[in-house]
Amino acid sequence: MKRLMAIGAAAAVASVASGQESVRCWGGGVIDTASYPNYGQSIVPLALGDVIAVAAGGYHTAVLRADGTVRCWGRDSESQSTTPVGLKNVVGLAVGHTFNVALRADGSIECWGLNQFGECTPPRDLGAVSLVAAGYWHALALQTDGNLRAWGDNSTGQATVPTLTGVPTQLSAGRLHNTIRMQDGSLQSWGSNGFGQAAVPAGIGPVTYVACGNYHTLAILPDRTVRAWGNNSSGQSTVPSSLENVVAVGGGEYHSVALRDDGSIVCWGSNVAINNGYPTNQCVVPPGLGRVSALAVGGYHAVVLTTICAADTNLDASVDGIDLATVLTRWAQPAAKFPEADCNRDGVIDGADLAIVLGSWGACP
């Protein structure tokens, strides 16, 4: 899906290392702010393990680990952050506003979270699945026989699959619309078109990637530039003129995010919660992200998978006396309170972290 929302006044930033890979989140702002609460969707928990994919929902975040298990955090009002007991062998993950869809290696799926519109009740005759996507309150699944299925909220026809003119190779779902990429690079879209989000621009030609935001759609062209259409009330469909070399994009409520081939992130559109103007800072990309390899966009938060130097406690791209002092001054203190000093993320700030800093002294790899 568009990978929905989050909150805040100062962008909440966290990271958790898993080997050289790290999950980083930002946006969502301040925890426990009554005027626009952050549910912890941008605060990454410790001990995530080896993460291979990231996803973002309305007020929650999910990751897929290399062992085939899923970890979620953030708002849990509909049990969307409570991973089903025994869920394993997961190879794909899609996150909606308040629900999740996991794809297992055997082609079966499991859904959990809100089921108000049947979004967590896939068709009984659903065959083996190869791809999944989640919108606000609806879901898509491509069966291994090439048949595309949809279920959940169908208030604007978003769960009624039209006749397709090719073989789908990528699925994307927004709040009330879907856009899918076919094998030949063409796009097919349906559902709500109140802002033109389901009207594929004439002459756009083949694309290499597509992503739906709340009421807008983004696509990467073969020259690795980005085209966007649909709602532009906050500039979310006005692509920066200098943006190039893009390999992935994502759309939130009223903003857009792009990942470039050098691992850097670019964001444009709203930086506040539209309903009350509260600063959410989803477009305040934190420094020291490292080289990002995967991106997911929530309504007002983002989550990435990035390669960092675990010993670089202050994220300045070098390991030096500052990092040494960070470990020494936080020695034996709670790692949950000072995660930057827990270099190996084992929950303890001790000699092992000191050894990592000394062993990585100098420029980060």
Image (spheres, helix red, strand yellow):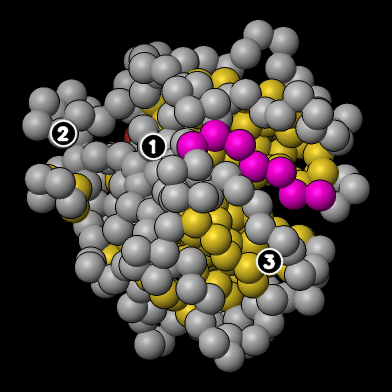
Label annotation for residue 118: none
Write down the residue under mark 2.
Answer: 36
Dot 2 and dot 3 residues touching (CB under 8 Å): no
Secondary structure category for the residue under label 2: loop
The C terminus, quarter of image: bottom right
Write down the residue under mark 3.
Answer: 181
Amino acid type, callout 2: Tyr
Q: Residue at x 43, y 57 (%)?
A: 192
Q: Position of residue 103 (x, y in %)?
A: 74, 33
- Marks 2/3: CA–CA distance: 36 Å
Amino acid type, callout 1: Gly
Q: Residue at x 34, y 64 (%)?
A: 194
Write down the residue under mark 1.
Answer: 58
Query: Is the residue marked by circle 2 packed among few (<14), some (14-19), or many (20+) residues within 10 Å?
Result: many
Residue 112: within the magenta? Answer: no
Q: Residue at x 24, y 51 (%)?
A: 281
Amino acid type, callout 3: Arg
| Between discs 2 and 1, the one toward the N terminus | 2
Q: Position of residue 75 (x, y in %)?
A: 36, 23
| Between discs 3 and 1, the one toward the N terminus | 1
Q: Is residue 114 above or below residue 198?
A: above
Q: Nearer the viewer, residue 343 or 62?
A: 62
Q: Is residue 225 above or below residue 139?
A: below
Q: Name the residue at the bottom extreme.
A: 203
The span shown in magenta is 147-153
Q: Nearer the viewer, residue 286 or 238?
A: 238
- Marks 3/1: CA–CA distance: 24 Å
